[in-house]
Image: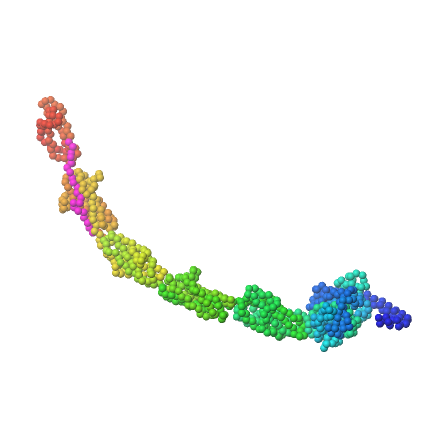
Amino acid sequence: MASRGLWHFMGARTRRGLALSWSALFVLSLLLQYFSFALASPIAAAVGTNLFELDGNAVDDSGAALPDDWDKVKAGTSGADSALFITDGFNQNDDIFTGGGSKDVSSISSWAWKSASVQDKDDIEHAFAAAYTQSGNTFVYFGLDRYQTSGDATAGFWFLKSSVGKAANGSFTGAHVEGDVLVVLDFSNGGAVASAQIYTWHNGALTAGASGTKCDGSVQTVCAISNTAVATAPWPYDDKGAAGAVNDFPANGLFEGGINLSALKLDTGCFSTFIAETRSSNSETATLSDLALGSFSLCAPAQISTQVKKDGQSTGDNGHITIGQAVTDTATITGTKGTATGTVDFFQCFSATSTPDCTSGGAKVGATKTLASGSATSDALTPIAVGQYCFRVEYTPATGSKYLPGTHTNTTSECFVVDKKPTSISTAADQTVGIGAAISDTATLAGATADASGSIVFKAYGPNDDTCSKAAAFTSQSVAVTGPGDYGPASFTPATAGSYRWIATYSGDAKNLGSAGACTDPGEHDVVNQATPTIATVASASVAAGGQIHDTASVSGGANPTGTVTFKLYGPNDATCANPAVFTSGPIALSNGSATSGNFTTTMVGTYRWRATYNGDANNVSVSGACNAANESVVVIPASPSIQTILDGGNGNTGAHITVALGTSVHDTSSLTGATADAGGTVHYRVFTDATCQTLMSGGDAGTVPVVNGAPGNSIGIVFSHAGIYYWQADYSGDANNNAASSNCTSETVTLDKAIPHISTQASADVTVGGKIHDVATLTSGFNPTGTITFTVYGPNDATCQNGTVVLPSATVTGNK
């Protein structure tokens, strides 16, 4: 309005001259803009190197050399450490500064805002910022576009360290902090002339600092630039001077600038709020118009890495420690803002069964630690429970630090597992006792925590279970554990002799692993020896050869002996039992401590010796009687057999006394009674004519025959030629094991009767009276008949031969006639 007032005080010529000059300048400006647009090429970053295009447009058109522009910030694809794109209301009620206190020189508490509209040229449509770190320097780029472009323009950009916001009552929250930065960009002559002025908040007031000019591609600490020609808008943009909501930026519609905070020593801590503002002028006390506000951090996020260590060494990802061991957590803070300073707090989270979620909370571990060279180590943590732990680190930057506060945890390097403490158990047995005595075991528990609890159980395996694979022979009562040390003894008395192995087993508890000895560990072996009983025997009485003998053994002493006895018989006449046994009986089971052998049938005379062996059982060793022990000998004397005979006259005519006809062949058979089964020798058969067997019948030797296995052969046959009584006798010769024997003389007899011949006659032929008659007699059967025949004539007519009339002289028998 001031310029229009001066226009009225000018003369017509002056106004006409100025109008012509302005017209010429306007045409020249258009031509310059045209050539500038036609020949435009990307301008290298004026602030920093290869980070951002400050070239008067918002589109990345520089290729790989300068990768970022505002289109990438809008798309979220920039490489900025921090980026912000604000879409602000325009051409309508908008959040704008209001009141006389809303000036950059005033404290934030004096600022006020309201919902209203502003001049079109001061109406912000979009505001944007991007921060980068390169080579330890912090570079910030910023800008805005506006609804209408006319005349000169001024914009301000606040970078505030505290969180500043708009309160519902029209005030602002937050306050200035020492080192807040304001950059004022001023554009004149259609943007051809650009400047940048830096202010800082120092000691409660706005203080002018460095200044810069238009961005020209050289390395500058601060500069400003606008589009001096129409430029493509990479987002929806509404140009008041053109129809539609999607237009290109008109000349001087896009403002952008950049600053190297580090080079200007303004990077003195974290910035958290960005405000873009339009101003009435470049004066410090200019009236503020529109605003666009957002959270924007110029501090880099801290890169926090941690590692849990045991005894100064890494436990590895999800590493393991043993209860009672201590761990520390080392936090290392790094980033693009140089060495981190400040403090860290360590927290631990616990779960008995799974990886705990330690993204928040947890119990603090020790004192707060101050970073040294970007690292700090927690106080030692000695977990008191078995389970899974995770650390969490909270980083608090020091005053003036260029890093943001942060917290960190993960499930690898920040987590670890606390295992139960390994234990070991050793025992002391190695006893040798006799059956009936007790054996015992004691155990030493080592490696456990001092407050170890649980229990120990002792088991004995056996007898002779050297792999402890069978059911335990003994299991003790549980023995309570009260820390490392010795426990026991546990004792028991084995019922069976043999080798026994002990195993002691510790149950473990909440802090200690269970453990057990091995079956074959040293100090785990007991031997229970068998008892030694005694054996006594009594042999049966002496017998004759062929008789049966046996032995009886009694086992006593020892440990209730059971089992069997084996009997062996030696002989005859083997006084040392050196030769093979002639008879073995058994094993014979003991009954009430004794056993009797089977019977042995003797075959030879002499002295026999029994030897009995108790074969032992689980608890008793085997013992044997001596070969020449008392009551173990049996004398076998020769047998005294008897001989029996039977006569055989043929045709079934057998017996001790037979009667036969003269001429019959008779033989004798005999058998022995009471002889050994293998009796040998001979039998001599004879026939006597007298009852005392003194007179041998002529031809009466019936032969001598052998005896085989007690069976004599038969005599030869004897044919008698004279009638009478004859006496047979059989004589057995005997042998080494059998006495001689004879049959009684009268025990068998043969009676010979006279033969009864048959006489037949043949009378002579009939004759006349006076003629001679005769008779012929014929003898048949009989035994060589001799003597005479007497003929008697009866008759005449004496049909019954009652009256003999003539007795003829005897005729001598000749043969059978």
| 18 displayed left or right of 131 | right
What kind of colouring is applied to the model shown?
A: rainbow
Q: Residue at x 88, y 71 (%)?
A: 8
Q: How many marks?
A: 0
Residue 150's image quarter? bottom right
Range of the magenta residues? 739-759
Magenta segment includes 394: no
Q: Which of 460 and 223 lies nearest the eye of the viewer?
A: 460
The reply, left or right, for residue 741 in relation to residue 455 is left
In the displayed structure, would residue 594 be above or below residue 317?
above
Above-or-below relation of 757 to 125: above
Looking at the image, the residue that sits furthest to the bottom is 203
Q: Nearer the viewer, residue 440 or 229?
A: 440
User: Dividing the image into 4 quarters, which one contains the C terminus?
Assistant: top left
Q: Residue at x 13, y 35 (%)?
A: 786
In this rendering, position of residue 191 left or right of residue 549: right
- Tell me residue 728's x, y (percent): 17, 44
x, y percentage for residue 79?
69, 66
Residue 270 showing in the rendered view: yes
Visible residue check, residue 249: no
Q: Quadrant of residue 801?
A: top left
- The outermost residue toward the front is 169
Q: Where does the N terminus fall, quadrant-wise? A: bottom right
**x and y, in percent, of residue 315 in the image:** 56, 68
Percent x, y for residue 362?
59, 69
| Camera-side residue of 593 and 166 | 166
**720, above or below 817, in the image:** below
127 left or right of 374?
right
